[in-house]
């Protein structure tokens, strides 16, 4: 399957240890040419790839399927290579803690990139940041930003990482208090630079308002000092998991036990941060897990028991879809179509 070219290819430093992570950002033609006018959709998604030592990277075919369906639904979609995958630096760990920090790094980037795009007054993008931020400068940290929807997604190992992430409030607070020379601040500067570049690329080129949009830009290390002065509100988070892995397979790829009653801590810019309990994350946010009944990585009984347990919690927002005949790699006849349909329905729902 051929994706549209990425709008931007770039690297960011990992909050864990500063290693460079290879990233891509896709803007749907639908989002920038809606009704012949330039438009920024207020929704984004992140898709994480399978386990790197087994060949996982952002070029994985199922990562591409998820990305394409989200693009068709009008999302800005980001993919990234975890340490040890593709051209990203570093090596895969046995704890998943560095990889979790890698995901948090890109999570923070996407929040700030979208925030900068959605700023109503373009002049606000040229300011300098005051760091750390005072409480009065950050009025909406306790609520969710109705103007921004963010799907945290992953396939296989990537889905495991998505469920272990800290809350959006924690991520925004981590980046809002970043020191000038920290990896978080470098990420914020990259987000601002790309948002400025994209805003310029979709400005009307004619009096009629036709967009002047050119996909594919590779960003170098030329990032200035400017960072947005108004901090983003935490987005409205949703979870989309494709072929989630459960014990004992999750024990093979990481020594950090993955189950609905465990959470994981990691280090970001020298400070500890703890993720949500997967059970809490998936039941308190709109969530969908999609898996096949022929997935040999995790027994169908475990997947069914796990899914039913989460969906039966009081006021649970977790849903699941079991696709008959589908394996872990979605190569069986007709199953990819069903996967695409499920992703499309989930992404378009209000």
Image (cartoon, rainbow, N blue to C red):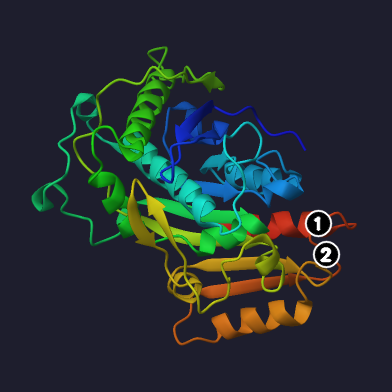
> Callout 2: 10 Å neighbours few (<14), some, many (20+)?
many
Q: Position of residue 85 (x, y in %)?
A: 65, 40
Q: Which mark is residue 320?
A: none
Q: Is residue 328 visible?
A: yes
Going 45% across and 68% down the picture, which residue do you hit? 285
Instruction: Please indicate whether residue 45 sits to the left or right of residue 94 in the image.
Output: left
Q: Foreground: 205 or 112?
A: 112
Going 46% across and 43% down the picture, which residue do you hit? 106
> Label 2 belongs to which residue?
326
Callout 2: helix, strand or loop?
A: loop
Callout 1: helix, strand or loop?
A: loop
Q: Foreground: 243 or 45?
A: 243
Q: Foreground: 124 or 92?
A: 92
Q: Residue furthest right?
A: 333
Q: Which mark is residue 330?
A: 1
Q: Vertically, is 281 above or below 112?
A: below
């Amino acid at each position: 399957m051929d994706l549209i070219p990425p709008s931007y290819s770039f690297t960011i430093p990992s909050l864990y240890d500063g290693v460079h992570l290879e990233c891509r950002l896709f803007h749907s033609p639908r989002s920038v040419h809606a009704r012949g006018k330039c438009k920024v959709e207020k929704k984004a998604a992140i898709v994480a790839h399978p386990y790197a030592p087994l060949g996982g990277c952002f070029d994985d075919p199922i990562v591409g399927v998820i990305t394409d369906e989200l693009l068709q639904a009008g999302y800005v979609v980001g993919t990234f290579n975890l340490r040890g995958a593709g051209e990203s630096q570093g090596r895969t760990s046995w704890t998943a803690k560095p990889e979790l920090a890698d995901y948090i790094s890109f999570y923070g980037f996407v929040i700030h990139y979208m925030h900068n795009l959605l700023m109503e007054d373009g002049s606000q993008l040229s300011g300098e940041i005051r760091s750390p931020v005072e409480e009065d400068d950050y009025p909406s940290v306790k609520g969710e930003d109705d103007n921004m929807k963010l799907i945290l997604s992953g396939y296989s190992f990537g889905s495991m990482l998505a469920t272990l992430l800290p809350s959006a409030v924690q991520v925004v607070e981590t980046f809002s208090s970043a020191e000038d020379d920290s990896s978080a601040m470098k990420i914020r500067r990259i987000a601002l630079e790309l948002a400025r570049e994209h805003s310029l690329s979709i400005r009307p080129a004619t009096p009629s308002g036709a967009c002047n949009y050119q996909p594919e830009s590779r960003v170098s290390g030329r990032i200035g000092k400017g960072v947005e002065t108004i901090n983003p509100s935490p987005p409205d988070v949703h979870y989309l998991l494709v072929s989630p892995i459960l014990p004992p397979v999750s024990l093979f790829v990481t020594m950090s036990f993955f189950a609905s009653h465990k959470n994981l801590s990691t280090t970001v810019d020298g400070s500890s941060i703890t993720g949500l309990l997967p059970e809490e994350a998936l039941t308190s946010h709109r969530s969908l897990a999609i898996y096949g009944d022929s997935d040999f990585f995790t027994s169908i009984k475990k997947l069914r028991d796990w899914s039913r347990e989460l969906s039966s919690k009081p006021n649970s927002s977790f849903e699941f879809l079991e696709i008959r005949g589908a394996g872990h790699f979605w190569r069986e006849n007709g199953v990819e179509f069903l996967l695409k349909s499920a992703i499309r329905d989930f992404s378009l729902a209000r």
